[in-house]
Every structure is written in C-alpha cells, then in structure tokens.
Amino acid sequence: MSTPSRARVVALDVLVRVEQERAYAPLALDGALSATRLSRRDRALATQLVYGVLRWQGRIDYYLQHFSHRPLTKVSPVCRAALRLAVYQTLFLKSVPPPVACSESVALVKAREPWAAGFVNALCRHFARKWQELSLPAAASDPVKHLAVVHSHPEWMVERWHGWWGFQETAAICQVNNEPAPVTIRVNLTRTRPAELAARLEAAGVQVEPGKLSPAALRLAGVGPVQELPGYAEGHFQVQDESSQLVAWIVDPHPGQRIIDLCAGPGGKSTHLAELALERAGKIGQVSPVVSVDIHAHKIRLIEENARRLGLDGWIRPLAKDARTIAPEEHGLFDAVLVDAPCSGTGVLRRRPDLRWQRRLEDLRNLVRLQRELLAAAARLVKPGGALVYSTCSLEKEENEENARWFLERFPDFEGSPLSPHLPGPAQDHLTPGDPWLLVLPSQFGTDGFFIFRAVRLA
C-alpha cells in the first residue's frame, strides 16, 4: 500500500477537524504544523491544500455530487475531505497530475477507512476523465446558482447579497473572498512613523505600500511570520486591517476622556484608541487608560500581551467580565463606548474561508439578539454628550443598518452622529458614509468588509 505524503495527511486532518468540530482553520492548521516536522515546502503545500479546499469547496462539491452515485452527506468526513483534496488539486494545481491527486487521496483513505478506498478511487478517476464535459450553472438562467458555484459561496449568502447589490457587486465580493488576504499593519504612532517603518521593512526585503483609508496603515507583501519582521518586537506596529482601523478614528478619543471597549479581545482597537489619545495628548498624564472588557480569559491575556509589546500596558486596563453586566453604578459613565460586536463575520471570509461553510442563516437570529443586548448595555454607560460606536465585520443588514435603526428607536436620548468629521484624511477622500453609518465592502478597496455606526447621547 502506497503511503500518502505527510503534507496531505496534515491537510486531511485539519479539514476533517474544521468540518466535524467547527475548528478555527488557522489555529487547527498551526497546531497540526507545529506537531509535525515538515519541510518548508511541505508546510507550504499543506497550507495551500487546506485553504484551497476551503475556498473552493462549493465548486468542488458541485463536481463531486454530479459524479457520485451517493449524496455527499452520506459519505464519511474522511472520504469527503480526501475527495475534495483530489478535486482541488486537479482543478487548481497544475503541478499535480490528476493520477497523482487520485492516488494520494486513495492512500489517505486506505490508511483510515480501507473499506471506502474503492469508492474514492472510482469517483476520483471518473471525475478526472469527465469533469471538463460538465458545464457550470449559467448566469443568464440562474445568476445566484452561477455565482454560488463559480465563486464557491453558500447559495443562501449569495442570494441575499445579490438582492441587495446586484450581480456585478456580488461577483466582485465573492472574487475578493477567494483571494489571499494581504498583511496590513497599523503603525504605532507613539513609537515611530509610517515612512520610517516602511523604510526599515523595505530594507529587509518586504514590499510596502501605504494604506488607502488609514494614515497609519501599511500593506505588506512578501512577508513570512510577522513576529520576525523589523519593528515587531519593539512594538512599532500591530497587525490590523484598514477598515478595522477606521473604528478608533470614528470613536475619536481625546485626552482626558474616559473610554471603554466592551468586546476588546485581542486588543487591536483598544490599543489603537490608546495610541490616538496619547498622540493627541502630548503630555502622557492627560490620558485615562482605556478600559478593555472581554468575557474570555484567554483574550484578556492577549490584550495584556499586545498592550505590553506596544508600550501601552499602562494605558490599557483589562477587565474580564460579561459586557452586558457592567453597571454605571460600579464603573461610572464614559465619554465614548465602543461595541465591536461578535457577528457572522461575512466581511472577513477571505481570512476565514472555513466560516462561509460553518455559518447558517439561522445563526443571525441569535447574533442579533446578542448584539442588541450589548448595545443596550452600552447605552447605560454613555454620559450625556458622549458617543457610542458600534461596529461589525459583517455584511448582513440585520447585524448592521437594522441594528442601528433599532438602537435609535429604542433609545430616543441618542441621535445619529455624522461620521465624516471623524474620518482620517485618506478615508475622507474615498468614502461617502451614509450618516450615521458606513459600510465598507471587501470589493471596494481590498480591505475587510466592515460596518461602523456612531450615535451621541443628548446632553
């Protein structure tokens, strides 16, 4: 019996875990790679296989279901993952001949479920012979099915986007979601300047471009682990997408203000708020620490670690608590309250290709309930004249505009606040927010999809 390559064994294990345990793909892959001694080349192959299969699972399954005599749901998770690996390599990896892709997947199944090896072998060979004869759904007859299969997204998700933004925009969003996400960093302006850090990175062989929306953003290419980049250990930057960076600008922290971040882990927005306040203060003593709340102990540890590395540990006050239970009688009122709420994550599917297959339409109901509970808790903490900012990395209207409208109706002592005066220069040049909120689509600037809403409590 032939032995499957170690890279493919790792990929199979991760794909099964992601599907069966709803494991977080990046963590599952990192754990699997750490537990094995693979060469650099095999690590790259395992990574490419995992993310490739997850990105293109919709199109892969379209082919498999057509050529299989049994429903894919009736196939074991190991067989499903092995079949997807074979089809992905045939469709997308020209360096792997179809017979090799087939034999590797058969070897994977023989090692786990030998009784199913014949089925996998027959289906793989049938697919390799006939797949080019199968047409994909036509856009003219069924645009939603076409987009879902061609761009490999759940049909329920595509149907909603198509109804809101039409065919071309939905196709653009899906296409971006299937591209590797860029590495974007936020320069720590309390320690360096974008031009200075860019020069250091370029001297180390990194390709650097300035951000399109945030003045503190740099987009990097040709990078390995960010922890090995110049400036990381010294706290000169934090990895953070540009659209996420806009949140702190819209909160607009100023010296002397009390600010609380209610869903803070792992600390990206809290540390950005502290940096902006410190930079504007001139004198450090004028700045109050940002209260960074998270219900999860491991995220509190990440907040502390990031704050320490960035030189901000004295300006971040972590608080392990359910944000919905924070009472103004205990913690007082705040000039600004940020709710970066747990959400469906449909704006970050290029970073989380596994998430598109794990999310269900019915998930939105529970998420919206949680988001509104968090908004209600946040409203109690805002002092008169203070601001509440709500953000998600979602594209879904229930989590975004509908929640903002609900909040303004439910809390008449708040009014929507125009965003334009708070946006940094680059964003003002490119964005026209529908006051009092803003939705950045992934297709617009190559950033994550993000929604931001701002309201002010009447004095």
Image (tube, rainbow, N blue to C red):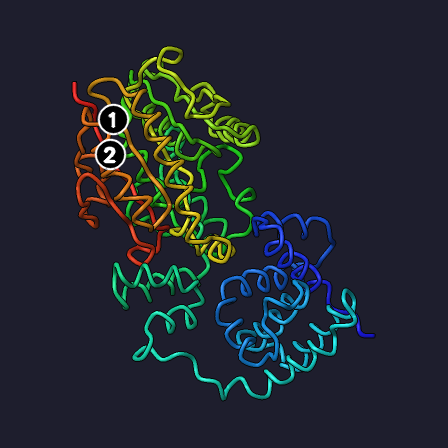
Q: Nearer the viewer, residue 118 or 361?
A: 361
Q: Of helix, strand and loop, which one carries label 1?
A: strand
Residue at 32% x, 73% y is: 143
Instruction: State the image coordinates of residue 280 (x, y, percent, origin top left).
Output: 28, 24
Q: Which residue is mark 2?
A: 454
Position of 118 with respect to 251 (left or right) is right
Q: On screen, 411 above or below 211? A: above
Quarter of the image that includes the C terminus: top left
- Residue type at the position of mark 1: Ala
Instruction: State the image coordinates of residue 295 (x, y, percent, origin top left).
Output: 50, 28
Position of 234 with respect to 197 (left or right) is right
Q: Nearer the viewer, residue 248 or 19?
A: 19
Quadrant of the image occupied by residue 415: top left
Quarter of the image that includes the N terminus: bottom right
Instruction: State the image coordinates of residue 335 (x, y, percent, origin top left).
Output: 27, 20
Residue sitting at the far right? 1
Residue at 56% x, 72% y is: 88
The answer to the question of whether label 1 and label 2 lie on touching residues, with beta carbons closer than 8 A, is yes
How far apart, in angstroms, are the residues tagged by discs 1 and 2?
7 Å
Instruction: State the image coordinates of residue 124 (x, y, percent, origin top left).
Output: 64, 79
- Residue type at the position of mark 2: Arg
Q: Of helix, strand and loop, which one carries label 2?
A: strand
Q: On screen, 12 above or below 103? A: above
Q: On screen, 227 above or below 49? A: above
Q: Would you call the spot at circle 2 few (<14 residues within 10 Å), some (14-19), or many (20 or more)?
A: many
Position of 452 with respect to 305 (left or right) is left
Q: Would you call the spot at circle 1 few (<14 residues within 10 Å), some (14-19), or many (20 or more)?
A: many
Position of 326 with respect to 21 (left or right) is left
Q: Which mark is residue 387?
A: 1
